[in-house]
Image (cartoon, rainbow, N blue to C red):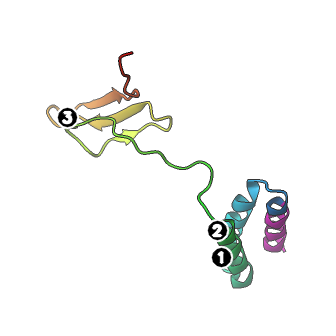
Amino acid sequence: MAARALLHLGECREGQAQAGARQAYQRVVREFGDRPEVASEARQRISALGGAPAAALEMRQVWTDAPDTLGNVSSDGRFLTFVDIDNGSVAVRICEPARTAA
């Protein structure tokens, strides 16, 4: 019953052009994947919405010739943490967008 309710919620949001439709359908697939009839319908609805969600990933080069490619970028993209292979220390690099001279 909850799976059908979520499916209908997605349909309502889709009809109102709300962004929540995709999330409702994805939740049906994630939480009720063992119910093939509703999961299949949710997958079809996701496909029909087309395109990627509004928040897409952005890739940019933050450091050339980095000594370690296994670092982690902070969630806001401002910092890169890595292990300095020369001395084993944990290091943090500040990643600011490149600025051009005016």
Identity of the amino acid at label 1? Gly
Q: Is residue 42 above or below residue 81?
A: below
**What is the number of the mark on residue 30?**
2
Residue hosting label 3: 88
Disc 2 marks a residue whose amino acid type is: Arg
Task: Depth check: give the residue in front, 46 or 85.
Answer: 46
Secondary structure beneath label 2: helix
For the C terminus, give its image quadrant. top left
Q: Are marks 2 and 1 in contact (CB under 8 Å)?
A: yes
Residues packed near mark 1 inside 10 Å, few (<14), some (14 to 19) or many (20 plus): some
Relative horizontal placement of residue 89, taking residue 35 as reference (left or right): left
Q: Circle 1 sits on which residue? A: 33
Please say if 37 is above or below 51.
Answer: below
Residue that extends furthest to the left in the rendered view of this protein: 86
Query: At 14% from the left edge and 33% from the top edge, which residue is drawn?
Result: 86
Q: Residues within 10 Å of mark 2 (few under 14, many from 20)?
A: few
Q: Spatial distance from mark 3 to mark 2, Cα to Cα?
A: 41 Å
Q: Compared to 92, does 73 lie above or below?
A: below
Write the residue at 64% across / 65% down.
Answer: 50
As drawn, which residue projects farthest toward the bottom? Answer: 37
Closest to the camera, between mark 3 and mark 2, is 2
Instruction: Residue 85: name its quadrant.
Output: top left
Q: Residue furthest front?
A: 102
Q: Secondary structure at mark 1?
A: loop
Q: Residue at x 65, y 76 (%)?
A: 33
Residue 67 percent coordinates (x, y): 19, 38
- Residue 57 lies, in percent from the top left, at 50, 48
The Cα–Cα distance between marks 3 and 1, rounded to whole angstroms, is 45 Å
What percent of the width, then of the height, locates residue 60? 38, 41
The magenta segment:
1-12
